[in-house]
Every structure is written in structure tokens, then in C-alpha cells.
Amino acid sequence: MERKRIGIIGFGARMSGLWSLVIKQAPDFDFVALVDPYPESAKGCLEHFGYNFDDVVLYSDVDEMLDKADLDGVFIASNCDTHTQYAVKVLNKGLPLYLEKPVATNYDDLYKLQEAGKGKEDKVVISFPLRVTPVARVMKEKIAQGAIGEPNFLEAWCYPNYGDVYYRQWYRNENIIQGLWLQKATHDFDYITNILGQEPVMLAAMNQKQVFKGDMPEGLYCVDCDKFETCPQGPYHMYLYRHEIDKIPARGDRKAFPYQCQFAKDTGNEDAGSAIIRYSSGMIASYDQCFFARNAAGCRGCKVVGYDGTIEFDWRDEKVKYYSHRSPLVETIDTTSTASHGGGDDILIDSFVHLVRGNGKSVANLTDGIRSVYMCLKAKDSCRENKFMELNFIP
């Protein structure tokens, strides 16, 4: 089998996980070129896979890599605000592309990406693992088979029990991620739309910042704080009540606990939001996201109701439940998986591998990524302007 030369833009934790799947699925793929603004961090990730800088050429910029590396495909897993500029360069070269979400963080970038991607939409795999997890695929199939009749209402929820990561790490910088509609809801808007098989036509949204706010100093690290032992978000409290006291860091040890205060003046991002979406059939979908639920309260999934039945799932237990409206029948389908993102990442990587080999089709193409970001940007507009927004942009 002819070997394939792969370039990567941004080799951090997310890309490390994806590359581990490539190694398993495509032994004919060689990681030969890298662009990364943090080479020392990337070096650690490379060494984890047994690579060194003799195996992978570190290029100074994306243009140089694309001009010199003779690539067969590219991954983009850089910071969110750079996705579009790099994707446009790769699309202009006509190479198969795996692109992390969100595909853009503003309208100007979104339109540039759409223009660059015309006629190449199916040469791109967007990192939307939720749409191809077993639970989402089963629900889509059951609805298409008429199990509930015509879908007439949808309720979806996202309550990640790890939500504090969006306030204590680099995610807290809204200049990079542009808030949690684009960072989180982009996944949910995509899988909801995919399950229904309809186009969204109108949206209204509201958000709030009620918990992760405060007057603590900007730039404050938890290990430097006077409230080290009393703050419920600090390391002392965290590890004490997990009964992992050996992990409690020493005061001032930022290497052991490199997180910043979530109640500081510079903590970005809303901490909850809701959206109402009307789809082309006239049906309504509601969506809620909340980032301060914890432990077993964490959940993420949706429920679709038709005249003949109701079907629902939650990634918390990876079960699809069908309730007949015509009989006492309740059916439970167990899809439990130990794989990354409920198995969705496996399917995305398989799709990209076959695109590079020239014998596949994207399971989450550029049009899907553009539509989702457009919905997220309109949700942000609705929150700011306090009104319904028409979704009249056709990708």
C-alpha cells in the first residue's frame, strides 16, 4: 500500500488523541510535517508517540509546510481563532483536510471559508464526533424509519460536569474561543440538525454569567491565592473531598496546579444559555447548556417527540430509549462504548483516512461545519440584541 504523508497544524492534547487513532487505523500514514507555535509542548507530544524532530520536520509557518512537504492530507487542531486562516490555505492546495471545530469564530472568516471550500466540501472532515456516536446514529435511524411518526418537538441538554475547564485554563480567553456557543453548542447544533434531517430557519437565544464571576485579581493562580484552603474551586477543597489529599499542591506550585481563579475579573465566557430553534417543517427544538453542574449531575443528550412515540438518549449512559404512544412498549438499546467521544472519533478518523486514500466520503463535511457556526454566531447575536434571528444563510 502506498504510504501517505500527513501534515499537522497544532499538536496538543486533542491532536495527540486523534493521532493515536490514526496509528491504529492507518499504519500506512506517516506524520512528516508539523507547524506549532509551542514547539517544546509539541515535542513532548511527539516523544509520547516515539517520534523526534528527525522524523517530523518542524516548519516555521503553514505556507512553508504546504509548499515543501509534499503532503497527502492535513490535520488542523490549532487554537480556535486560527482554524479558518489555515483551512483556507489547505483548501487552496486541494488537500484532504481534518478540521477541528469551530470552523470559524466570526462572520468574515465564515464567508472566506465558504468561498475557499466551494466544490471541495466533501474533501473536509469536521471534528463533530457526537453526530456519529452509536446513540445519535440509532436515534437518527429510528426516526427515519418512522418509529415516532413525524418528529414534532425536540429537547436537548448539555450539562458537562467538567465545565470549570472553560474558566480556569486557556479556554477562559474569549478572544480565542469567542464564548461557549461556538466552543460547545457547535457540537450540539450539528448533531440535532443531523438527526432531524431538516434545515434550521429561525433562532432565539439567551445566556447568563451568574456563577463564574467576581472581583478577584486578574491573572491570579489558585496556588497563590489567600483563599487556598477555603475556595470550593481551589485545589485544597477539590482533592480533600475526592479523598486524594496526596495530590494537594504546595502553595505557589503552579506546575502542580497550573489553573487560574474562576472568580477573577478576567474570567471570560458565559456559564449557561438557552436557545429555541425553528426548523423547516415548523417544529421547534429547545437547547440548554449549563457549565456549573457537577459529578453525577452531568448529562448531555436529547429527546424527540412525535405523535406516535418518543425517543431519547443521553451520553451519560449511552442508551437509547423508545416509548410507544400506542402501547405500553418501552424499548432500551444499549450502545455503551469505552472509545473516545463515545466512539465518534473512531468514525471521523476512518472517514478522513478513506478520503486521503481516495475512496471515501466525509461523514461531517464543510457544509455541516459552516451551518453549525452560522447558528452559533446567530445565537450570540440574539443574546446581544435580545431578539429572534432569521437563519437565511444557505451554506
Image: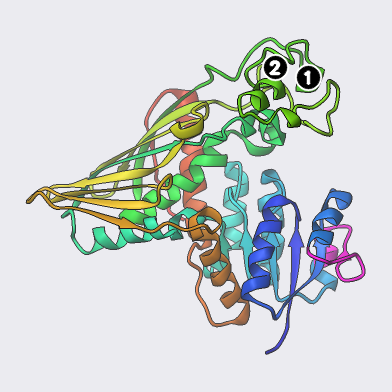
Residue appearing at x 63%, y 66% in the figure: 21
The residue depicted at 43 percent of the width and 38 percent of the height is: 299
Q: Is residue 236 left or right of residue 123?
A: right
Q: Please say if 154 is above or below 196.
A: above
The residue labelled by disc 1 is 220
Q: Is residue 302 above or below residue 56?
A: above
Q: Secondary structure at mark 2?
A: loop
**What segment carries the magenta color?**
49-65
Please say which color scheme the image uses.
rainbow
Q: Secondary structure at mark 1?
A: loop
Which amino acid, by three-letter code, is at mark 2? Ala
Residue hosting label 2? 264
The alpha-carbon separation of the residues under discs 2 and 1 comes to 7 Å
Q: Amino acid at mark 1?
A: Leu
Question: Residue 263 appears at what percent x and percent y?
Answer: 66, 17
How many labels were placed on the picture?
2
Marks 2,1: beta carbons within 8 A: yes
Q: Quadrant of residue 170?
A: top right
Q: Residues within 10 Å of mark 2 (few under 14, many from 20)?
A: many
The answer to which image quadrant residue 178 occupies is: top right
Image x and y of residue 17, in percent: 66, 57
Q: Is residue 94 in view?
A: no
| Magenta stretch encompasses residue 64 | yes
